[in-house]
Amino acid sequence: MAHHPLRCTLALLLVMLAPAAARAQWTIAAGAVDERTVGAARFASSTALHVVWSPPAGQVDHFRIAATEAVAGHTVEATAAAAAREVVLAGLKAATEYTVLVRACANAVCTLSTVSPAAAATTSAEHWQLIGAGRSVDGLTRIVSDGNARLSATRFGPEAGTMANRVQLYYGPFGVGRNPLSTAATPGPVDAASPSSYLEFISRGAATGLWTPESPAPLVAQVATGQGVPLSASLGGAVRLFFEAQGADGRTRVLSLDSVDGYTGQDFNPGGSSLCATAADYMGGCAPAVVIGVDGDETRGNRGLRNARQFKLGWPTLDDWRWDGAPGRFMVVTTDQVAGCSTSAMNQAYAVWDGGAWHVQYDARACPKLFTSAQAAQPVHVGGARYKMYYGDPSLTSGRDPLSRLPFLGPKKLIYADGAVTATPGLVDFEDWEAQGSAREVVFLWPDGDVLDARAEGYIDDWHFLSPTGTLDLQVMYLTITDGAVLPFASAAVLLNP
């Protein structure tokens, strides 16, 4: 069929002019979802907005709703039937301004449409409430009787045998010699309707895990924080315990050991003992693999890194509770000042898994790619190739007790990543993360609803954000806390407005 340029031009002009003529007849509003008040704090859902509209008269086949956020320009879209006049947009970023447009499509392919005026709305900041009573650390729930520092948490899915649907902590217990990294597990499967099922843990004390040896092994002179990562069947169906250890040379690296008790994830010694406890163990059956080495190491060395410390892996935990070893998964690693690259005392290096090894990423200056002035970062999968990440900013010292020797990590920040930003949309590269300048504040509430001040928030450390049921409807922060004076202990907070 022959095309008629004049007719096509007139048709296009009519389509362009129609929305402008009809725009004044639209009404549209966007606002909060699930508004509520807890103590002194008023907030709404941190990931959803309610959109209401009234279109001008005319043929409507369906509506298309688009919300574009102001930080990275990403758009979340939804469709609605011709009779609809409202929708809840989900999967949004917390504390983020969105511009919302509604398009009234006159046909199925939406080649004829009118567009509403823009409506602006901002999602609520995340509000996390500590578990317990009152408004001080004295009233907080101790989730495991001997829980001290070096805390992380692991979720097991339905295929994990006796550990099915349970949560296990890897942590340093009180009152046990030689700084062990031990385990504590929920007594049974997690039930979202029963908070005790994910907030109470039975200590394995000194009976499981890793001990600091009396005499140093080359790689293990002192054991520190760990993270238990369940492996898929193709990787052995075990728990890989990634852990940081200071070596005999005084420098800290990220190492790993695989469990010998499958998904129980408590025994990492293939010998008769259930503990890795001596220098002989760490040079024998418990000899760890180097995951992230430091400058000068022959094995997995990384230029510019003097130490590799608190770390966390990022993999799509909403898709599968097990890590499948697929290339492109990432790890954030706390390192100290990097000469010529960052003057901050604490930074986060970024490593990517290539299917066989973790590689710290470097920029054109030969500097490791860094999140600067960031400590103890924790990525959380939020669907697809999208993640959020929490970290402390230790450069902000308001509230810090100058007489305390306990770690002060400053306020907690939140940024997002979307793998679609760069050329490999299924993977999350360093460049897929938002700039730190757009980091959101995270709000913490005492059990009585009062907001934590800078001092109280700054002394939250060694945290692990987890979805105990495998969905974002329930999000728990397992954490270590002090007031700068008492010994840190293990407690928890729950996200009030997912």
Image: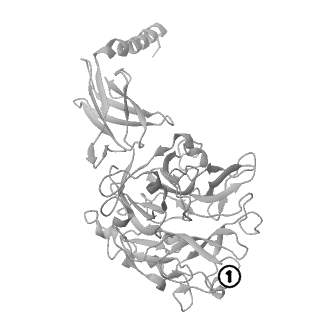
Residue 126 versus residue 84: which sits nearer the camera? 126
Residue 227 is situated, as x and y percent measured from the top left of the image, at 52, 68
Residue type at the position of mark 1: Pro
Q: Is residue 412 above or below residue 108?
A: below
The part of the image, by quadrant, that contains residue 184 is: bottom left
Name the residue at the left extreme. Answer: 83
Give the colouring mode of the picture.
one colour
The one nearer the camera, 457 or 331, is 457
Query: Residue 254: x percent and y percent?
Result: 63, 68
Report the residue marked by disc 1: 216
> Quarter of the image containing the N terminus?
top left
Q: Residues within 10 Å of mark 1 (few under 14, many from 20)?
A: some
Figure quadrant of residue 213: bottom right
Element under disc 1: loop
Residue 127: x and y in percent read 37, 50
- Position in image of residue 189 (x %, y %): 32, 72
Residue 437 visible? The answer is yes
Please identify the residue farthest to the top as the structure is shown. 6
**Could one spot residue 34 in this view of the protein?**
no
- Where is 286 relative to 191, above or below? below
Q: Residue furthest front?
A: 403
Left or right position of 221 against 449: right
Question: Closer to the camera, 435 or 394?
Answer: 394
Residue appearing at x 32%, y 31% in the figure: 30
Q: Residue at x 25, y 18 (%)?
A: 58
Which residue is at the far bottom? 272
